[in-house]
Image: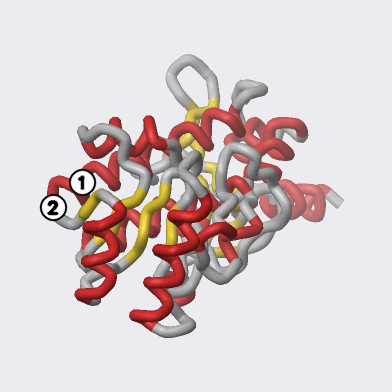
């Protein structure tokens, strides 16, 4: 009986960094996924659970699926203390904290893409970039007018076919302005390059975490709704798979 009880306790710990192989197990659902499709948490020096967005912080980690709902469930069910085998305090606003960190990470990658010379801002300039075929993705301010998003989305699909290119609608004009160091940027074209791929990965993680339904929807102008009203709806099975991002609205 004692052996059986120990086996059950050990089964609870497979979400730690001690797992072998290229996958980790969600401490909430027991589902496995690659690390880049999950969230890692460690115990801070003050005894509080800390989100490790970059997966680089020292210490034993607890892995949770890339979902606001799952993080909320982990807090409610005290999953962190059980997995870490230690007293671990999880702040009630941990789900909001994670989203804020993912948003900040995505905006930082946008800034890096801009420094790499991959961002073209302004409706007319974006139209010309689309015509030239040098566009890896489009960026629209979520508070921008739907008509402009629709026209550029149509131009993008005319140039690249029905599959199109990803369109990002996660950020406000103020957020984009701050990231780019410019004023009133509503539309921007992202050139093909490594920095754009990193940006798409960061935006994808944020959208999937939020549960934005449009993370799986065809790209297209006025249909961009990945804004502050986004609510958790379902986990996304394609998280981290860049091959599936073409013709997606993020």
Q: How is the image coloured?
A: secondary structure
* Element carrying mark 2: loop
- Residue 241, compared with residue 62, is above or below; it is below
How many numbered marks, from 0 up? 2
Q: Answer left or right for 54 relative to 89.
A: left
Residue that mark 2 sits on: 116
The answer to whether residue 87 is seen in the rendering is no
Q: Residue at x 73, y 39 (%)?
A: 73
Please name the residue that numbered disc 1 is placed on.
112
Query: Callout 2 environment at 10 Å: few (<14), some (14 to 19), or many (20+)?
Result: some
Q: Residue at x 65, y 48 (%)?
A: 27
Name the foreground residue: 103 vs 43: 103
Furthest-top residue in this view: 46
Query: Is the residue marked by circle 1 packed among few (<14), some (14-19), or many (20+) residues within 10 Å?
Result: some
Q: Residue at x 53, y 19 (%)?
A: 47
Q: Secondary structure at mark 1?
A: helix
| Of 75 and 207, the residue lying toward us | 207
In the rendered image, which quarter is residue 243 located in?
bottom left
Q: Residue 37 appears at what percent x and percent y?
A: 50, 58
Q: Is residue 72 left or right of residue 206?
A: right
**Looking at the rendered structure, which numbered label has been put on residue 228?**
none
Q: Is residue 69 above or below residue 134?
A: above
178 lies above or below 196: above
* CB contact under 8 Å: marks 1 and 2: yes
x and y percent of residue 6 in the render?
Answer: 74, 48
């Amino acid at each position: 009986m004692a052996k059986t009880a120990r086996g059950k306790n050990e089964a609870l710990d497979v979400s730690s960094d001690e797992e072998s192989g290229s996958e980790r197990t969600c401490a909430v659902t027991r589902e496995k996924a690659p690390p880049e499709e999950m969230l890692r948490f460690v115990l801070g020096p003050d005894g509080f659970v800390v989100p490790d967005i970059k997966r680089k912080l020292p210490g034993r980690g607890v892995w949770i699926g890339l979902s606001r709902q799952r993080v909320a469930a982990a807090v409610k069910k005290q999953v962190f203390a059980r997995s870490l085998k230690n007293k671990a305090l999880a702040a009630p606003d941990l789900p909001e904290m994670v989203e804020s960190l993912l948003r900040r990470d995505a905006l930082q990658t946008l800034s890096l893409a801009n420094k790499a010379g991959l961002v073209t801002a302004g409706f007319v300039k974006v139209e010309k970039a689309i015509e030239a075929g040098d566009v890896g993705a489009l960026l629209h301010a979520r508070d921008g007018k739907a008509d402009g998003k629709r026209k550029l989305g149509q131009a993008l699909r005319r140039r690249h076919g029905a599959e199109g290119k990803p369109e990002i609608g996660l950020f406000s004009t103020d957020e984009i302005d701050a990231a780019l160091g410019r004023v009133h940027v509503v539309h921007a074209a992202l050139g093909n390059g490594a920095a754009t791929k990193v940006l798409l990965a960061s935006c994808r993680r944020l959208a999937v975490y939020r549960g934005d339904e449009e993370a799986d929807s065809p790209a297209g102008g006025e249909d961009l709704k990945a804004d502050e009203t986004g609510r958790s709806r379902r986990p996304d099975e394609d998280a981290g798979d860049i091959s599936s991002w073409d013709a997606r609205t993020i």
